[in-house]
Amino acid sequence: MGEVKLSIFGFGNVGRATARVLLEKERVFKEKYGVSFKVVSISDRSGTVWLPEGMDLREVLNVKEAFGRLSAWSNDYEVYEFSPMEAVKEIDADIVIDVTNDKNAWEWHMEALKRGRAVVTSNKPPLAFHYAELTAEAGRRELPYLFEATVMAGTPIIGLLRETLLADSIEGIEGVLNGTTTYILTKMEEGVPLEEALKGAQRLGIAEHDPSGDILGFDAGYKATILHCLAFEPITFDEIEIRGIDGLPLEDVQRVRKEGKTLRLVASIERGSVSVEPKELPKESPLAVSSTQNAALIKTDLLGELLIRGAGAGLKETASGVVSDVITATIRLRGG
Amino acid sequence: MGEVKLSIFGFGNVGRATARVLLEKERVFKEKYGVSFKVVSISDRSGTVWLPEGMDLREVLNVKEAFGRLSAWSNDYEVYEFSPMEAVKEIDADIVIDVTNDKNAWEWHMEALKRGRAVVTSNKPPLAFHYAELTAEAGRRELPYLFEATVMAGTPIIGLLRETLLADSIEGIEGVLNGTTTYILTKMEEGVPLEEALKGAQRLGIAEHDPSGDILGFDAGYKATILHCLAFEPITFDEIEIRGIDGLPLEDVQRVRKEGKTLRLVASIERGSVSVEPKELPKESPLAVSSTQNAALIKTDLLGELLIRGAGAGLKETASGVVSDVITATIRLRGG
């Protein structure tokens, strides 16, 4: 398998960053892994560009950046109005890449697997609600189903749990997995009220236009659910405990600070139990991260405590995880 | 491959810890990976016990702990006086495990590969001097040659570089990779002279009887060489710069402390350049570890900075890396 056909779903920030890494590091990947990637389709909300012979990523990035939508490319190429499900059925690809926010994407992930395609996803809800079905289907068909970028962007906590800690039994994981709340809590420590800190985060592009997923703790909850599934056994998002930072009084945050500690939204994962809630941490705690850094402390029977800390957000940081998975999937598909 | 034949070389602390993990987690590994390990030989300095049908690990651990040497088992079994090379040639095994300190082990690692056996090693000099030959031979024969436990015990920095950061290009690594010097430097900060701190470390079993490898920086140098080989390209230990902590004046250590900083033996790895030397670190530096913790800060083009921190020594901590590699080798040998 010298040439691998990719079908990319989602062409927002992460999708474009992924395309950019594939384009800019094309020669590196060819040399290091002996592989060429051929992007046969890209879909955004406006439509699907599908070129079985592969497309010029520089050109497609230019179109998207100039016009904001792929359908503007219809002067040069046919643009299809497929649903993701239709696109998965129609388009022949080796690896389906989901960098959308589609909450129902698990259905077309399943379809992709049934059609013998590997799946790489940065989209969390499919795993947070359907981990068991998806990984069972992938297992049955011996297909890679990979999701490094769903937790801590490209910081390889998924790979670490899946590929490296093979002799250890995980006893628990504690993590700060959402950068937006860290940013807001840091601002609140400085005396800025939540609403205002949130607006600042939105101006900086750290928080989404609809930030409820961050503030209510859903984003951290999705991630914690996925870590539980991987470290222990499948559960779903409905089964976990979440308390976000909404309604957190400014005085509380400042009191914690005065006591020389710091408040972070902490996910705690043990067998059969996942919770997300604001927790007081000593300043020197390895989880007392700042800005969009994430950290996770993994406890195991043999190693004791293991800390992994790195980017938890960012475009090329997330693309790192997506493309790393694409390379892993490629190596596995060719039986390496 | 339901049953995998292991040949263990070295039955000191790490060898016994490895056997203990294989024994105690036998059922876990069987359930999780569908594999049974059959130890067909164990060698210590006194001789080799070889039972092609597999041995009772509980029994062999009891003999070693009661008598201090495997040759005491000659009442029940034949004990062979093989050199490691002879043992590799003679004994049929799927995976050869080197947990010795044999500086010339690379020769019998090569022999093992030539005979179609995978190799798992915690022994550093073979890699620090012969990385290129060993990995080329393993590559040619498509055999696993794995060495997680050579750097940071079982803390999975090797796996992280090898299996997970596939899209990133490494730009540099800085690490505190030797716990003995951290212990000694911490004691010196408290006013204890080097000689005395060293004796304390020996009493605690942290430092070897011959601690020159730690003090002179050789141990950290071996590890840094291996990281360079993996992250960039093969070099050998002869090509790197090392300044240990021998002769470091107590006043220097205490001056650094008074300035609110801390001194650690830091390995710096960039393409084509490896150095090991005592460095002043801010107290809040992620590399300012204590006791036998190790830490490494990995810089890449996409992720920026990634920190991994955990056990750098210890028996079950090292066995974690050895056994994880044994499981990885098994999965690869059966084509998974």
Image: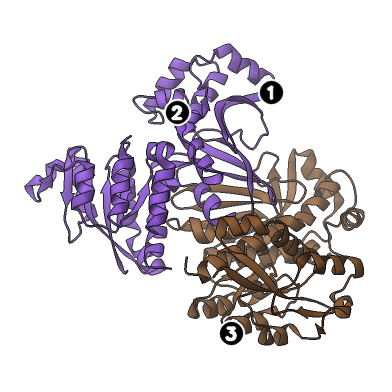
Chain colours: A purple, B brown
- What residue is shown at x 38% (from left), y 31% (from top)? A205
Residue bearing the label numbered 2: A218
Image height of A189 relative to B245, above or below? above
Callout 3 and callout 2 share a chain: no
At mark 2, the secondary structure is helix
Considering the numbered disc 1 on the image, is that residue within a helix, a strand or a loop?
loop
Q: Please name the residue that numbered disc 3 is placed on.
A: B115
- On the image, numbered disc 1 is attached to which residue? A260
Q: Amino acid at mark 2?
A: Phe
Q: Nearer the viewer, mark 1 or mark 2?
A: 2
Q: Chain of mark 2?
A: A
**Do marks 1 and 2 share a subunit?**
yes
Q: Amino acid at mark 3?
A: Arg
In the image, residue A3 above or below residue A314: below
Determine which of the numbered discs, if any, sits on residue B247 in the image. Answer: none
Q: Is residue B280 left or right of residue A127?
A: right
The residue furthest left is A75
User: Residue B98's spot in the image, x, y percent?
Assistant: 70, 72
How far across and down, in percent of the image, does residue A14 sit?
34, 42
Q: Nearer the viewer, mark 1 or mark 3?
A: 3
Circles 1 and 2: CB atoms closer than 8 Å: no
* Residue A177 drawn at (x, y percent): 51, 35
Residue B90 visible from this viewpoint: yes
Report how far apart the C-alphas of labels 1 and 3 lie in the structure. Answer: 61 Å
